[in-house]
Amino acid sequence: MTKLDSSFPSTRGWIAAAALGAAIGAATAQDLGAAEQLPEARSFGNVQVISGGVDLGQAETMRRAQSRYPLRIVYSVRGGAYAVPDALRILQGNEVIAELPSAGPWVLIDLPPGSYKLQSVFDGRTAERLVRVGREGQTVHWMAPNGVE
């Protein structure tokens, strides 16, 4: 009878290690799957808008997905905390092409290249930004006006 090398793990050890690895892998995949889910996109004609990121996990998911969207908006207040405006309107010329109540703090927008006006409403006050979106995309870091929490 041949003696087994004692440095080589037993079959029972391999089975236990495989079972533990499978359990950890399944739990990790389940956690990642939930964390990587983007909020549902809203359609406004040919414009798709995803708004969310209120909790840190979703904000990280949106940050990782941002390169797939030509226009990205991140709202914050002084000090770096996220902010959520009461409304966001996207205009091309004088035409409103998308309007969202309480958008953000992350907003990912799939729209064609062009010039747009963004209107964000904070506590009844409207702030505007003009943006030009090209093929490389653009990120707008929008700080809420003083006094907005």
Image (tube, grey):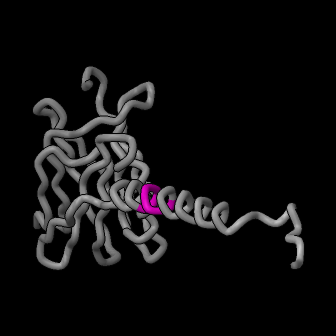
Q: Position of residue 9 (x, y in %)?
A: 76, 64
Which of the two residues, 102 or 142, is positioned nearer the viewer here? 102
Q: Position of residue 24 (x, y in %)?
A: 50, 56
Which residue is the extreme one toward the top?
A: 147
Q: In this rendering, would 137 be left or right of 111?
A: right
Q: Where is residue 137 in the image (x, y as percent from the top left)?
A: 44, 68
Q: In this view, does 45 lie above or below 27?
A: below
Q: Is residue 107 above or below residue 5?
A: above
Q: In which quarter of the image is the C terminus?
A: top left
- Predominant secondary structure in magenta? helix
Picture residue at 20% right of the left edge, 68% below the top: 92
Which of the two residues, 115 or 124, is positioned nearer the viewer here? 124
Which residue is the extreme one toward the front?
A: 1
Q: In this rendering, would 58 be left or right of 50?
A: right
Q: Position of residue 28 (x, y in %)?
A: 46, 56
Picture residue at 14% right of the left edge, 63% below the top: 98
Q: Is residue 121 magenta?
A: no
Which of the two residues, 1 or 53, is positioned nearer the viewer here? 1
Q: Quadrant of the N terminus?
A: bottom right
Picture residue at 40% right of the left edge, 26% below the top: 78
To which quarter of the image does residue 135 belong? bottom left
Part of the protein shown in magenta: 25-29
Q: How many marks?
A: 0
Q: In this rendering, would 139 be left or right of 45?
A: right
To which quarter of the image does residue 47 belong? bottom left
